[in-house]
């Protein structure tokens, strides 16, 4: 009698699990010295740049064929603008999740952080040395950022049927933090997601409710 064979199979999501496709918003308009971005509740709220609009369209065309049950955005308009082409193709109305807005950067918000990076400001070097946003004066604490982003993801999951797939257009810092929580990595291991990229989290059903990182920084759709 021949021995039974067990071929290696492709990955398949566990029954009842939820997949959250985290989309980093498209590129926003350029920061200009002495012309800070418009603020929304103290945070930079720039619109997309022309490059960001092209990235948003590429995201929409790539994700439109997936069985999305919902689209989520944050209060900051660059996420809503990125989600708009996908919403048009799918007929889904984006839902705002305030807890998933970007980390508050204190005195370096409003576009100042981007300028500080380019100028090699020592405050930026200290952020990456310490791997803490809150070394910037006035910035949100790491503990508060962790708690609210986790709450935002849980809020999404709790409103979905088992097996659902959804898209959430969020921010680079948020993607990095959620991946850190899912993996138990060092704080800044995942802060380098590209604009318009996709990162997939799989949330297992109760009682496990573990998170898996299915993929990080998918960007091939942006290069077609």
Image: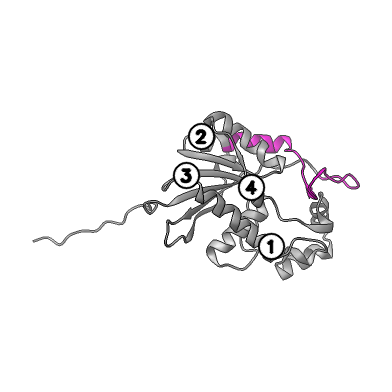
Indicate the position of residue 20 as horizontal and vertical percent values. Answer: 52, 49
- At mark 2, the secondary structure is loop
- Part of the protein shown in magenta: 31-59
Of the two numbered discs 2 and 4 in the rendering, the one whose residue sits closer to the viewer: 4
The Cα–Cα distance between marks 1 and 2, rounded to whole angstroms, is: 34 Å
Give residue 78's position: percent from left, percent from top: 70, 41
Spatial separation of the CA atoms under disc 1 and disc 3: 27 Å
Q: Are marks 2 and 4 in contact (CB under 8 Å)?
A: no
Q: Residue furthest bottom?
A: 130
User: Going from the N terminus, do you reach mark 1 or mark 3 first?
Assistant: 1
Distance between mark 3 and mark 4 Cα atoms: 16 Å
Residue 37 sits in which quadrant?
top right
Q: Nearer the viewer, residue 163 or 1?
A: 163
Residue at numbered disc 3: 165
The answer to whether the residues at label 1 and label 3 have Cβ atoms under 8 Å apart is no
Q: Residues within 10 Å of mark 1 (few under 14, many from 20)?
A: few
Q: Provide the residue designation for mark 2.
A: 64
Disc 1 secondary structure class: helix
- Compare marks 4 and 1 and give the one earlier in the sequence: 1
Q: Which residue is mark 1?
A: 144
Residue that label 4 marks = 170
- Lower sequence index among marks 3 and 4: 3
């Amino acid at each position: 009698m021949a021995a039974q064979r067990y071929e290696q199979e492709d990955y398949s999501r566990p029954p009842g699990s939820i997949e959250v496709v985290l989309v980093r918003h498209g590129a926003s308009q350029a920061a200009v010295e002495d012309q800070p971005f418009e603020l929304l509740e103290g945070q930079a709220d720039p619109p997309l740049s022309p490059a960001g609009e092209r990235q948003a369209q590429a995201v929409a065309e790539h994700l439109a064929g997936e069985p999305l049950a919902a689209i989520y955005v944050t209060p900051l308009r660059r996420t809503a603008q990125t989600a708009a082409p996908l919403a048009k193709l799918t007929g889904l109305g984006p839902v705002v999740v305030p807890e998933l807005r970007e980390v508050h950067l204190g005195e370096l918000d409003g576009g100042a952080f981007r300028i500080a990076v380019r100028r090699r400001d020592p405050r930026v070097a200290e952020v990456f040395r310490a791997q803490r946003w809150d070394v910037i004066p006035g910035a949100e604490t790491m503990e508060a950022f962790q708690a609210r982003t986790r709450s935002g993801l849980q809020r999404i999951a709790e409103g979905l049927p088992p097996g659902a797939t959804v898209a959430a257009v969020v921010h680079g810092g948020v993607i990095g933090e959620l991946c850190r929580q899912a993996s138990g990595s060092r704080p800044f291991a995942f802060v380098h997601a590209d604009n318009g990229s996709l990162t997939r989290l799989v949330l297992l059903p109760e009682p496990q409710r573990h998170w898996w990182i299915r993929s990080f920084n998918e960007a091939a759709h942006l290069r077609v």
